[in-house]
Image (cartoon, rainbow, N blue to C red):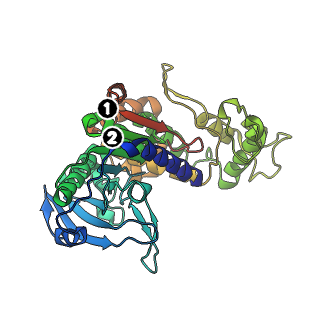
Amino acid sequence: MKRKSVAWSLFLILVLTMIAGCAGNSSTLSVPLATTCTDLAGKTINNVTITSTKWFEASDGNPAFCQVNATRAPYLDMEVDVPQNWSGRLWQQGGGGLDGKITSAITTDAVTGAITDVNIALKDGLSVYAASNGGNRSSVPAQAAPLVWANGTLDGVASAEDYAYAALSTTREFAKAIIRKIYGTSPMHTYFNGCSNGGRNAYIAADHWPEEYDGIVSGCMGMDITGQTVALLNLGSRNKTPDMPSEAQWKAVTTSSITACDALDGVTDGMIANQSACHFDVTTLQCGQPTADPDPAVCLTVQQVQTVKDVTSDIKLAGGMTVYSGYNWADWYPHVLIFGVLGGGNAVLATGDPAWFSELSKQQSFKLDHDYPIFQYGFRIAGAAPDKSKVAAFVASGRKLISWHDGSDNLT
C-alpha cells in the first residue's frame, strides 16, 4: 500500500505541474473568507444541507482554508475545502472500496487535533478540494454498503445509485455552488482524481460528464467491473474450503515466486517488477515434491495448487472469451481475505441480493458462466459500469486522462 500511495502522489504532482499555468488567481473577496465560512453553517443549497464549517488559519506551510461539511438525503456526506488564495481550480477526489467514509483533504492528530498532512491539491495547488462518502456510512450498520443497497427501501435504492454514479455529480455541483457563494464565480478548470473504486469513479466521470472535467486521473482501475467481480469471486468462493490455501501456504507462494522472479528486472529488491517474464511453477510447492516444504501445513495440496494456477491465469467463459486477465504474482496474504467481501459487495450492487455478501454459501455457489451475464446486465442497469467508448471519446476530444496501475495491486 505504501508503494501505491507514493505512486499516487507522484501522479498528483505531475498533474498539478501540468495544469499550474492553466488557471488564474481568483482570490479576491468582498468579505473575509473566515467570516463567510462561519456564516455558511446551517444553510441549504440545492437540497444539500451544510452541517458544519471550520476555519483553519495558515500554519506550518499549510494554507488558510474553510472546511465545509454537508449532507444530502439519504446518506450522502460531503467535504469541500476552500483555500484563502484560491487558484481558480476545483479538484474532486474519488473514494475507495465500498466507500462509506470521506477521503478528507486533511489528516489530523487523534490527540491534539492538529493537522499532520494536507492533500497536495489543496496545499500546493490551492485548489478547492471536494470529496464524498459515496452515498453510504460505514460507521452506521443500517446505512452501510453493501447491505443498505438491498434493504428493500427507497433509501437503499438511492444509496446504490449514489455509489454507482450520482454522488459524483452532486458533490461536484455542491462544490461549485460553494465556490460561487464565496468567490462569486465558477471554477475555471475542474479535475478528477481517484484510485481503486475512485479509479472507477474517474471513468464514470469521463463517461457521464465529459464536458465538466478538463483532466482526469484514474488509478488501479480494472475498467471492467463485471470482470473484476467474477475475478474476486473466483477466489472468494473458495474461502473456508479445502481448495483455499492457508495464511502460511499463501506466504510460501509469495516467498517462492519472489525468489524465482525478483531479479528478472535486473534489480533484487524484494519485488517482481517484470511480471511478464515470471513463469514461476507453483507445482514445485506441492506436497511430496522434493522442492516443497516437508511441513504439510506449508506445502500445497493438489487442489490448492490448482487454486493458485486458476487465479494467476486468465478467466474465460465456456466459449473461450477472456473476461479478466490473471492476477500477478504478489504479496497475497492478507489481501485474499477481502476478495469475497469486495466481490460479494459488488454482486449485491448488480443483483440486489444481500446473500452475496452475508452468506458464505452463496459465494461458494458462484458459477462463472451462469453469474457473469447476470452481473454484467445488473451493473449496466445500475450505471456502475463505465462505457469504454465514451471514455475514449473523452480522450479524443482533447481533454486529458492519466490512467495508472500499481503492479502489486491484485484487487483491480
Tag 2–tag 1 contact (CB < 8 Å)? yes
Say whether residue 153 is visible. no
Which residue, as the protein is rendered here, is positioned at the far bottom?
112
Q: Is mark 1 on a helix, strand or loop?
A: helix
Outermost residue on the right side: it is: 290
Amino acid at dot 2: Ala
Q: Which residue, given by chain and number where applicable, does mark 1 sit on?
A: 377
Residue 60 locus on image (x, y percent): 46, 71
Q: What element carries label 2?
A: helix
Q: Residue 302: name its quadrant.
A: top right
User: What residue occupies the far top of the structure in this picture?
Assistant: 319
- In depth, the one of 200 and 130 nearer the eye is 130
Q: Is residue 283 left or right of residue 232?
A: right
Residue 193 percent coordinates (x, y): 39, 46
Q: Which of 153 and 220 is in front in this view?
A: 220
Q: Which residue is drawn at 46% across and 74% down?
A: 109
Circle 2 is placed at which residue position? Answer: 350
Q: Marks 2 and 1, how far apart in space?
A: 8 Å
Closer to the chain start, of discs 2 and 1, is: 2
Provide residue 319's location: percent of width, then percent of height. Answer: 48, 19
Residue 354 lies left or right of residue 270; in this view the side is left
Q: In this view, does 309 lie above or below 149?
A: above
Residue 264, given in percent of the width and then of the height, sits at 75, 35
Residue under the point 48% across and 44% down: 14
